[in-house]
Image (cartoon, rainbow, N blue to C red):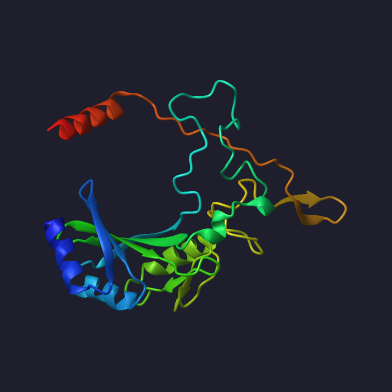
């Protein structure tokens, strides 16, 4: 198994124009890369660093990253949908989405999970999209064939396009689906609902009748796992 810090330093020194930064946490190396010549960088990872397998591709929407509207130390006794600061999806209508959607420099990112069977290690790549209105990144289907359906899924759920994909179309949502359901400003209940119309003898679409609401508050629970982590951090800081 390779030393991950050594690998990170090697990648950063060799690909200075491609590697923006890297982090090492929980024995996992994450490298943030630039869009410029990304395919060449990915090809080098496959052929020269033996990352022959692409395990997964995921999208990320940073629209509400770091926004917490709940009192997280204790669960609320007043029922669901009673947040302290109503700032996230479920507390506003789609037309009144937060202004952050256009103010963020880099809202969308694509995450690539690579596996080297030969060296028994993994590498995570993070690639940010330059345009929030029409996020596009290069396709890696010509480098890893498994990227085909992964990129289609990311396009379907996040609206991120992959330039050079041979068949970029929706893969999970219904025909004629409007919007991308994993975006943070997409309403939890969707835009439309469908039902069978007895008079027309067919399935029809109509505006959704469910009122958007937050279902589950985020609560920091004080159990032994978090207490052990906190104790370790305090010991490290005292040392």
Q: On the picture, is 10 further left or further right than 163?
A: left
Residue under the point 60% across and 25% down = 79
Q: Is residue 118 visible?
A: no
Locate residue 112: give its quadrant: bottom left
Residue 199 versus residue 194: which sits nearer the camera?
194
- Residue farthest top in this picture: 77
Q: Position of residue 31 (x, y in %)?
A: 27, 61
The relative height of residue 15 versus residue 189 in the rendered view (above or below) is below
Residue under the point 16% across and 70% down = 13
Q: Is residue 127 visible?
A: yes
Q: How many marks?
A: 0
Q: Position of residue 71 (x, y in %)?
A: 49, 29
Quarter placement of the C terminus: top left
Q: On the picture, is 112 further left or further right than 117?
A: right
Q: On the picture, is 109 further left or further right than 30?
A: right
Quarter placement of the N terminus: bottom left
The relative height of residue 80 versus residue 182 in the rendered view (above or below) is above
Q: On the picture, is 184 further left or further right than 65?
A: right
Residue under the point 77% across and 56% down = 204
Residue 234 versus residue 223: which sits nearer the camera?
234
Q: Position of residue 164 (x, y in %)?
A: 44, 79
- Residue farthest right in this picture: 199
Residue 74 versus residue 52: which sits nearer the camera?
74
Residue 187 versus residue 64: which sits nearer the camera?
64
Q: Position of residue 160 (x, y in %)?
A: 49, 66
């Amino acid at each position: 198994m390779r030393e991950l810090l050594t690998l990170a330093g090697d990648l950063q020194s060799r690909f200075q124009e491609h590697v923006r930064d890297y982090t090492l946490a929980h024995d996992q190396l994450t490298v943030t890369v630039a869009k410029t010549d990304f395919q060449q960088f990915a090809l080098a990872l496959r052929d020269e660093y033996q990352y022959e397998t692409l395990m997964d591709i995921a999208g990320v929407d940073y629209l509400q990253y770091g926004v917490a509207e709940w009192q997280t130390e204790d669960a609320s006794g007043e029922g669901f949908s009673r947040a302290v600061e109503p700032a996230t999806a479920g507390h506003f209508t789609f037309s009144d989405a937060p202004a952050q959607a256009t103010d963020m420099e880099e809202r969308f990112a694509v995450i690539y999970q690579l596996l080297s069977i030969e060296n028994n290690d993994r590498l995570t790549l993070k690639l940010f999209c330059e345009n929030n209105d029409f996020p596009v990144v290069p396709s890696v289907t010509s480098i890893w064939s498994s990227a085909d359906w992964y990129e289609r899924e990311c396009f379907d759920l996040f609206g991120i396009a992959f330039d050079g994909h041979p068949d970029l179309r929706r893969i999970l949502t219904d025909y004629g689906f409007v919007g991308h359901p994993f975006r943070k400003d997409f309403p939890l209940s969707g835009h439309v609902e469908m039902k069978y119309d007895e008079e027309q003898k067919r399935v029809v679409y109509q505006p959704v009748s469910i009122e958007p609401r937050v279902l589950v508050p985020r609560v920091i629970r004080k159990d032994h796992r978090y207490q052990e982590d906190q104790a370790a951090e305090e010991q490290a800081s005292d040392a």
